[in-house]
């Protein structure tokens, strides 16, 4: 359906293309004469105080505004309508903030330490904030990847984790999974989490899509729901037809399958055992070993309070728990910030498990 934007429209009919910021630089659509610029973009930010990645809508820069304007009239005169005033535009940043200044530097810190380079002495073109680096060092110390101090050192576990081209939280899951007996399941889950959203929504067939997705729901949460989808996908005789019938993104699941194959090869090369288990408790404890910073506790008003940073948040509407059940303690993959904070991809866990798997949480959870 996305490819239709490149096709010429019928004679005497206006073609409207709804695009994300991918249309700024990555693609050029012929025949566009008019652009409507909303002046916003969704970007991922790392909150160094809370140690959490947040996806939120922010104002674009003036450079992005002119880039969007340039999409109009590439092959003929065009016009751009901006849905903000000139004085608002004058308050925008002149250029887009480099990603290293707003992204989580934890992976960068680990990779540099694996090369015996201390980030505190490294000559970055755009150096991350000191608070972000300190947060990254503490997070890696909590994961067991480094020994944090005046001069930090990478641990043998950290060396293993640095071999995976992943966020250190995911790397910790993979290096811990064999111990919990669920390596196969964690490999598949991490592969799906590394892909885009595998669920396809449809305005025309919303009820059918909801019913189709409900078949995969797990009472334990979203992570096992994603695992259910992947397990059935790799067993399907005609995966493309199966994805269409179940309102699933075939391209994303193929990508996840390829990632899973590559991660399996890396794990075998590192000497890790590829085992499998149907023990749900072990699976959840393994998730806690990597996502110990992403734990939230249910409050009396029905909201959740994150243990890291004490941020108030709600469960995301896409969760299998939404409007059904509110566990006392949950683990989440990501926080999304719009008008409120929302926790995406959640699984219910027991508080005592968190204290058992990650001793440093004993003082953080009450």
Image (cartoon, rainbow, N blue to C red):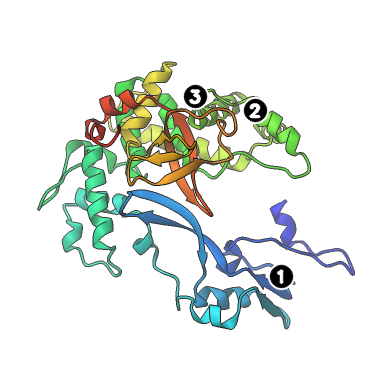
User: 4 or 289, which is in the foreground?
Assistant: 289
Q: Earlier in the sequence, mark 2 or mark 1?
A: 1
Which quadrant does the C terminus fall into? Answer: top left
Q: In terms of secondary structure, where does tag 3 sit? A: loop
For disc 1, the marked residue is 30
Q: Is residue 275 visible?
A: no
Whether 151 is drawn above or below 354: the answer is: below
The single residue placed furthest to the right in the displayed view is 12
Q: Secondary structure at mark 1?
A: loop
Tell me where residue 68 appears, x and y as whole percent: 60, 73
In the image, residue 359 above or below residue 124: above
Q: Is residue 130 left or right of residue 5?
A: left
Give percent across and percent down for residue 43: 48, 59
Write the residue at 45% across / 75% down: 95
Q: Residues within 10 Å of mark 1 (few under 14, many from 20)?
A: some
Q: Residue at x 74, y 39 (%)?
A: 206
Find disc 2 in the rendering and name its residue. Answer: 214
Q: Determine which residue is flagged by label 3.
A: 220
Secondary structure found at label 2: helix
At x 56% / y 38%, what residue is drawn? 254
Residues tagged 2 and 3 counted as in contact (Cβ below 8 A): no
Side (left or right) of 125 relative to 79: left
Of badges 2 and 1, nearer the viewer stands 2
Frontmost of labels 3 and 1 is 3
Residue at horizontal 50 percent and vertical 77 percent from the top: 63
């Amino acid at each position: 359906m996305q490819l239709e934007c490149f096709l010429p429209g019928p004679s005497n009919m206006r073609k409207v293309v709804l695009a994300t910021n991918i249309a700024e630089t990555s693609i050029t659509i012929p025949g566009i004469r008019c652009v409507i610029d909303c002046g916003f973009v969704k970007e991922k930010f790392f909150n160094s105080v809370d140690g959490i990645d947040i996806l939120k809508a922010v104002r674009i820069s003036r450079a992005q505004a002119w880039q969007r304007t340039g999409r109009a009239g590439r092959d003929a005169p065009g016009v751009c309508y901006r849905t903000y005033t000139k004085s608002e535009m004058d308050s925008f940043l002149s250029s887009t903030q480099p990603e290293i200044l707003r992204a989580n530097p934890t992976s960068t810190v680990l990779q540099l330490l694996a090369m015996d380079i201390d980030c505190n002495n490294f000559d970055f073109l755009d150096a991350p904030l000191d608070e972000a680096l300190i947060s990254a060092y503490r997070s890696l110390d909590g994961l067991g990847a480094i020994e944090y101090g005046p001069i930090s050192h990478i641990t043998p576990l950290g060396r293993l984790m640095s071999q995976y081209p992943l966020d250190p939280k995911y790397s910790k899951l993979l290096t811990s999974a064999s111990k919990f007996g669920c390596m196969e399941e964690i490999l598949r889950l991490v592969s799906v989490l590394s892909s885009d959203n595998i669920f396809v929504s449809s305005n025309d067939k919303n009820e059918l899509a909801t019913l189709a997705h409900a078949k995969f729901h797990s009472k334990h949460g979203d992570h096992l729901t994603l695992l259910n989808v992947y397990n059935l996908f790799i067993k399907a005789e005609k995966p493309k037809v199966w994805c269409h019938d179940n309102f699933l993104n075939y391209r994303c699941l193929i990508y996840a399958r390829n990632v899973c194959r590559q991660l399996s090869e890396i794990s075998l090369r590192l000497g890790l055992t590829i085992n499998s288990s149907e023990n749900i408790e072990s699976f959840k404890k393994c998730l806690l070993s990597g996502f110990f910073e992403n734990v939230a506790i249910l409050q009396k008003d029905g909201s959740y309070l994150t243990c890291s940073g004490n941020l108030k948040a709600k469960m995301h509407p896409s969760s299998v728990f939404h409007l059904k059940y509110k566990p006392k303690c949950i683990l989440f993959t990501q926080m999304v910030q719009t008008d409120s904070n929302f926790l995406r991809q959640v699984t219910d866990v027991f508080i005592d498990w968190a204290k058992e798997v990650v001793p440093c949480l004993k003082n953080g959870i009450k």
